[in-house]
Image (cartoon, rainbow, N blue to C red):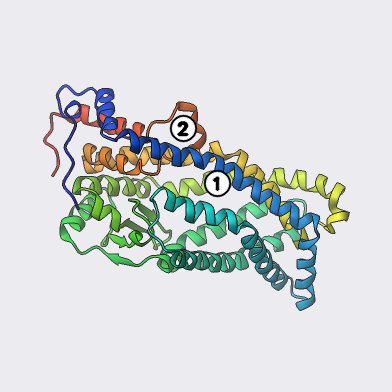
Amino acid sequence: MIPLAPIPPAAATYPLDPVAATRAYLATLSPEAHAKSDAYFEGGYWLLLVGFVVTAAIQLLLLQTGASARMRDVARKVTSVAAVHAILYWVLYTLVTTVLSFPLTLYTDFFREHAYGLSNMTFGAWMGDQSKGLLVGLVAGSIFLPLLYTVLRRAKRTWWLWGTAVSLAFLMFFVAVAPVYVAPLFNKYEAVTDEAVRGPILSMARANGISATDVWEFDASKQSNKVSANVSGLFGTERISLNDNLLSRCSTEGIQAVMGHEMGHYVLNHIFKMMLELGLIIVFGFALTSYFFERIRARFGGKWRIEGVDDLAAFPLLVLLISTYMFLMTPILNTMTRTQESEADIFGVNASQQPDGMAQVALKLAEYRKLDPGVIEEFLFFDHPSGRNRIEMAMRWKAEHMGAAPKR
């Protein structure tokens, strides 16, 4: 932990003007740091488009060349069990698409992160994490795809409805097991023992109806210098975790503000609300996919050797349609997440009573998130409130509470 940085005079003078205080905090970031952050984040806009185009191109390649149909045929030759067909096809599909998309992954996740000073990983360590991610994807898909194709075989007309139920059930299952079985594959998790950190956090948890007995720390510094924390899990696996960068790079006040934010997600039932919202997104997307699938199959099905929606060879077409829909829904998905993050911010500053801690952490996040975007830009591309909006929210809170003694 480090001491709370000096508070700009405009953010410490009564009566406090939240807008002026926000400008003062923004001014503490150097023009060079502003420019670097903006370049990194704005480059992500193009990468979002490039990623979609590459995904779409790979799906079309698998269909046009007949590679998807050949992978289905290989699966059929091995066994007559439909579930095993799906597993074998998934393994082949995942390996092929991983290889084809690897150049873009290498650039975006390794070279670009190093170019902006955001990664601490050697190439070998990075490849190790990539391999673990591939293994997790193979296992997860080997569970989900047989379930989905069982629905596709038995409910060819209404699969979009039942497929949504299966997708949500699987997503909730994955969220529940991830903190226990997936996250530890990538990072080491340990209970925080420093009472100066642990005590105030658990006190804040108890005060807000959270019966937590542990705060978890994970060693994210082996991957990057980014500060972060999260609330994860369902049905008894819930954990509130913070990374070691947060402990080493932020003040006690900042840590408390961040953990108050994470508790907000838990208290406000954001995981369950997000599942409900995603259910609506998925069911509408699956319905559109079902509609367009049959029309595309009628025109290209013979060339692509697609027999029907329940044919594994048609899986790239399903991926193409769903990924197109999700790409177009990006602003909506971002707004859903950004709204919950804003709610958690307000909860966090009320719970921690650390507005300056929150403002200073927002400046740390500006290392990889654009700090001061335009309104339309924030709506389209931000899945969290911008740093400017987060600081201004904290300063509004401070302006209304400045007469009270700050919490220490």
Front residue of 325 and 187 = 187
> What amino acid does circle 2 point to?
Glu
Task: Count how many numbered circles sit on residues in the image.
Answer: 2
Task: Please tell me the numbered disc located at residue 378.
Answer: 2
* Camera sees residue 383: no
Q: Residue at x 35, y 67 (%)?
A: 188
Q: Which of the 4 image quarters holds residue 8?
A: top left
Which residue, as the protein is rendered here, is positioned at the far right? 302
Quarter of the image for the C terminus: give it.
top left
Tell which circle, 1 or 2, labels the residue nearer the N-terminal end: 1
In the picture provided, is 403 more to the left or to the right than 40? left
Number of other residues with Cα within 10 Å of mark 1, as a class: few under 14, some 14 to 19, many 20 or more: some
Front residue of 379 and 249 = 249
> What amino acid does circle 1 point to?
Leu
Front residue of 375 and 311 = 375
* Camera sees residue 336: yes
The percent position of residue 384, horizontal first and vertical second, equals 42, 40
The percent position of residue 181, horizontal first and vertical second, equals 44, 68
Quick check: 124 above or below 257? below
Q: CA distance from mark 1 to mark 2?
A: 21 Å
Number of other residues with Cα within 10 Å of mark 2, as a class: few under 14, some 14 to 19, many 20 or more: some
Front residue of 149 and 20 = 20
The percent position of residue 268, horizontal first and vertical second, equals 37, 45
Q: Which of the 4 image quarters holds residue 24?
A: top left
Mark 1 element type: helix
Mark 2 element type: helix
**Residue behind mark 1:** 278
